[in-house]
């Protein structure tokens, strides 16, 4: 389980294809603390560490993950938001994040508010996911609060710290991002759909 509080940014060092899988090798400030078989969220996608060297580590994404996330658009040199799984005795600063991306969204606009930024994202509403005003949503693994909720889009307001310490500063109109909708909201929507 994750909280959506980004711990660090990693950088893609290599991408290797093997059948329908892709192996991503990244450098990160905490590489020396990782262990094989550990779960790390990459732009909100829970991936397992399969190899570690002195400076880099490798994770593997299968075709199912590649088709439902923005991993296919990553290139060598790109920055990736990273979060290790929550320790049982840690603070819960974000919201419940599983590291399972529900779908992708396209950035529609980025508005500079002279001290903050408002990002608007558009997604396919036919998949049944919803946002609510002042509810939580995860964008590229970042726990954020929705400030404008509509049927197929939402906006989030970003403070300078989040802008500078995540890869949101690289997101422009047209960029593809990963979304994980609030788990409680998903269960409520599912139950109401069955009623």
Image: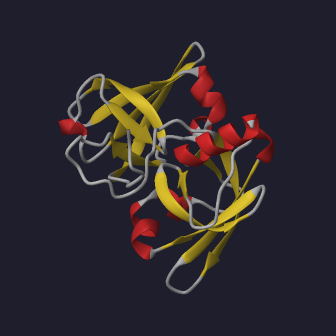
Quarter holding the C terminus is: top right
Give x and y (percent) for residue 56: 29, 35
Quadrant hosting residue 48: top left
Which residue in the rendered view is the most extreme toward the top? 19
Specify whether 129 is left or right of 88: right
- Locate residue 151 relative to residue 132 in the image: left or right: right
Q: Is residue 41 left or right of 74 when viewed as pictured?
A: left
Residue 39 vertical placement versus 122 (above, below): above
- Give the position of the N terminus as an image quadrant: top left
Viewer can see residue 173: no
- Residue 162 horizontal/vertical position (percent): 43, 66
Query: Would you place residue 168 above or below residue 160 in this image?
Result: above
Residue 134 coordinates in the image, percent (x, y) = 57, 67
Q: Which residue appears at 53% of the width and 64% of the height?
A: 145
Q: Residue at x 47, y 55 (%)?
A: 142
Is residue 59 visible to us here? yes
Name the residue located 30 percent from the left edge and 44 percent from the top edge: 28
């Amino acid at each position: 389980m994750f909280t959506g509080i980004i711990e660090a940014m990693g950088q893609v060092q290599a991408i290797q294809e093997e059948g329908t899988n892709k192996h991503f090798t990244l450098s990160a400030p905490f590489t020396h603390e990782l262990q094989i078989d550990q779960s790390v969220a990459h732009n909100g996608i829970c991936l397992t560490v399969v190899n570690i060297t002195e400076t880099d580590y490798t994770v593997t994404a299968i075709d199912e993950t590649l088709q439902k996330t923005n991993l296919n658009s990553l290139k060598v040199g790109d920055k990736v938001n990273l979060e290790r799984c929550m320790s049982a005795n840690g603070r819960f600063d974000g919201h419940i994040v599983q590291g399972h991306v529900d779908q992708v969204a396209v950035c529609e606009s980025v508005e500079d508010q002279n001290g903050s930024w408002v990002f608007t994202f558009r997604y396919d509403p036919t998949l049944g996911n919803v946002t609510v005003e002042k509810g939580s949503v995860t964008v590229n693994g970042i726990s954020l609060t929705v400030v404008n909720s509509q049927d197929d889009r939402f906006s989030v307001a970003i403070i300078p710290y989040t802008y500078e310490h995540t890869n949101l500063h690289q997101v422009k109109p047209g960029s593809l991002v990963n979304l994980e909708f609030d788990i409680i909201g998903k269960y409520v929507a599912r139950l109401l759909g069955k009623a």
